[in-house]
Image (spheres, rainbow, N blue to C red):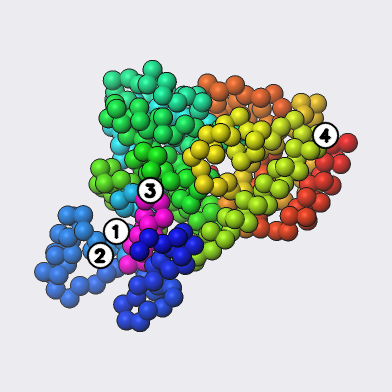
Amino acid sequence: MKKNTNTLCATTARHSDAIQMANPPMYQGSTIIYERMADLAAAHHAYENGQESYTYGRKGTPTSRMLCEALTELEGGHRAYLCPSGLAALSTALLSQLSSGDHVLMVDTVYSPTRDLCEHVLKRLGVSTTYYNPFLGKDIADLIQPNTRVIFLESPGSLTLEIQDVPAITAVAKAHNIVTILDNTWATPLYFKAFEHGVDIVVQAVTKYLGGHSDVLMGAVIANQAAYKSVRNTAHQTGQFAGGMDISLVLRGLRTLPTRLREHERNALQIAQWFETQDAVDYVRHPALPSHPQHALWQRDFLGSTGLFTVAFKPEYSAAQINAMVESYDLFGIGYSWGGFESLALPVHPSHLAHVRSVTPVTQQSMVRYQIGLEGVDDLIADLQAGLSILG
Ligand SMILES: Cc1ncc(COP(=O)(O)O)c(C=O)c1O
């Protein structure tokens, strides 16, 4: 039976050995004990042949298997692998496909630690990177080199929320036998069906909406059948894993994911629309607003929007004034990360953006990235309104 997403999140991961609890038991720890060498050897053999079997905590437990299966049910693809952070999942995905002498096409508006990974680890290993404009669709073909192995996408873009034409890019990649990897954290598996749009490997920073409660760091790589084996091998060979307690927290987060996302979406849209009416604001970048430059692409490909968007203030306001406004908020903490229940604000100044963009023009005004949480929207708007008064 094909289940609706709400039902899936509520009923997934319900197996149990003896009795059927609404939530699965938590397996925590390192050691799995066997009485007989033959049984350990059989488990090891099964594992090496790609079957699910348990030999050592780092290589998986029934708890990690349940979350992997739940993520695969939600996202699609063949199988998932868990990593200790979103960034660890990003590095696992990239390292699984790249070798010395290879080339990556990396979207210029990528999450900046992914850029650091290219500039440091991949460069050191002899992998070269070309950053491409997020507005490129099929013309990305012009940037392909004989040694291009991966096209990496992140849509919407980090901080500036550009929407990419994912199907156009994956079609070009398939024609050239190039693997596509997408950071799908903003949309979650619920609001962008990456595998249906031709993506080969999806990365989720589970830390954000899937966990949803700002109490866990985790990442997941979900791959199609062709890519999964190298993802799994690379993850093993580099020691990726997630602990039982953290996995249980994420399984609990999944139960309420659809409901939380609807609330994030509603609150964020209302606040983004309110910002558009404020004199101090130059423009708002929220993909679900008609004013967003790629709104039509978002409407074509996405099933919803989440709680993260950016506001550009008029150029006359200095970085110091924008910082003072953000510091004055009561309900918005200043913080990295996002996707939790709490609202956050993060100033983004041109001096910062200039360091994390190679080919995309950088606006000359200060922006603030808002993560809209689950508080009452009237209280949030009152807080933001009081903040605007600081700008005079
Ligand atoms: C788009 C995106 N991908 C990946 C990550 C990394 O996740 P983590 O903080 O769990 O390493 C982040 C974190 O902010 C992110 O914004």
State which quadrant residue 179 falls in. top left
Residue topped by disc 2: 54
- Is residue 24 visible in this depiction of the protein? yes
Between the C-alphas of marks 3 and 4, the distance is 43 Å
| Residue 99 percent coordinates (x, y) | 28, 32
Q: Nearer the viewer, residue 106 or 321?
A: 106
Which of the two discs, 3 and 1, sits closer to the camera?
A: 3
Task: Work out which residue is located at the far left of the displayed protein and give it.
Answer: 38
* Magenta residues, start to end: 62-76
Check contact, mark 1 vs mark 2: CB within 8 A.
yes
Label 3 lies in ligand 1 vicinity (Cβ under 8 Å): no
Q: Most prominent secondary structure in the magenta stretch? A: helix
Up the image or down, 8 lies above or below 369; here it is below
- Which residue is disc 4 drawn over? 279
Q: CA distance from mark 1 to mark 4?
A: 55 Å
- Kindly state the secondary structure of the residue where label 3 is placed: strand
Q: CA distance from mark 3 to mark 1?
A: 15 Å
- The answer to which of marks 2 and 3 sits earlier in the sequence is 2
What is the secondary structure assignment of the residue under circle 4? loop
Q: Is residue 64 magenta?
A: yes
Name above or below for residue 142 compared with residue 89: above
The label on residue 227 is: none
Q: Spatial distance from mark 1 to mark 2, Cα to Cα?
A: 7 Å
Q: Earlier in the sequence, mark 4 or mark 2?
A: 2
Establish if 281 lies above or below 371: above
Q: Are marks 1 and 4 in contact (CB under 8 Å)?
A: no
Amino acid at the residue labelled 4: Asp
Secondary structure beneath dot 2 equals loop
- Residue 333 lies, in percent from the top left, at 70, 51
Q: What residue is shown with label 1?
A: 59
Q: Amino acid at mark 1?
A: Lys
